[in-house]
Image (cartoon, grey):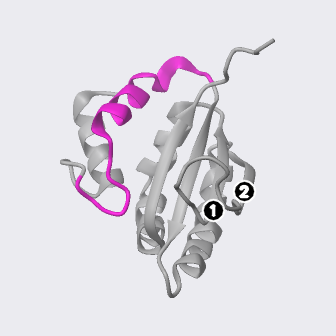
Amino acid sequence: MTPNERTVLVSNVGGAVDGSAEPERLNQEGFAGFAERAGDGTPVVMLNLLSFKPDGGRERYGEYGDAVAPLLEKVGGRIVFAGEPAAALLGAGSWDLVALVEYPTRQAFLEMIGSAEYQAIGHLRTEALAKGELHPMDPAEPTP
């Protein structure tokens, strides 16, 4: 991915090149590191931490889920797990929904979010969320 392509994609994902879009502020350094590995050919699991806006956020996110499902399938992705967390046993944070979404490669994720189809529906996610985080994860070394 060229630096210019990355700038355009960052603009499309974060809502602004400066990463100031809310409720999900783009971490430009993290995104750049993710994009640099786009060609490594390894699967990636995305940890989605989601807090919905009151008065319709959950329903709006359902619309997003329905709209993104065919795009996810098109790039070979799949939802591994989605669940509503109970009260935290450690820490003070809380989320309304946690989801693990697997993509065959980082490039597949970038192709999905960079597509015209995704650009047409991405606003549904933003409109649904009061707060959100997206963490790419690699497999960890097994512990004894």
Q: Is residue 29 magenta?
A: yes
Asked if labels 1 and 2 touch by Cβ distance under 8 angstroms, the answer is yes
Q: For residue 104, which quarter of the picture?
A: top right
View extreme (bottom): residue: 55
Q: CA distance from mark 2 to mark 1?
A: 7 Å
View extreme (left): residue: 18
Q: Is residue 58 above or below residue 134?
A: below
Q: For residue 42, which quarter of the picture?
A: top right
Q: Which residues are magenta?
A: 20-42
Q: Is residue 90 magenta?
A: no
Report which residue position mark 1 lands on: 97
Q: Is residue 99 above or below residue 60?
A: above
Report which residue position mark 2 lands on: 82
Is 143 left or right of 51, judged from the image as shown?
right
The amino acid type of the residue labelled 2 equals Ala
Quarter placement of the C terminus:
top right
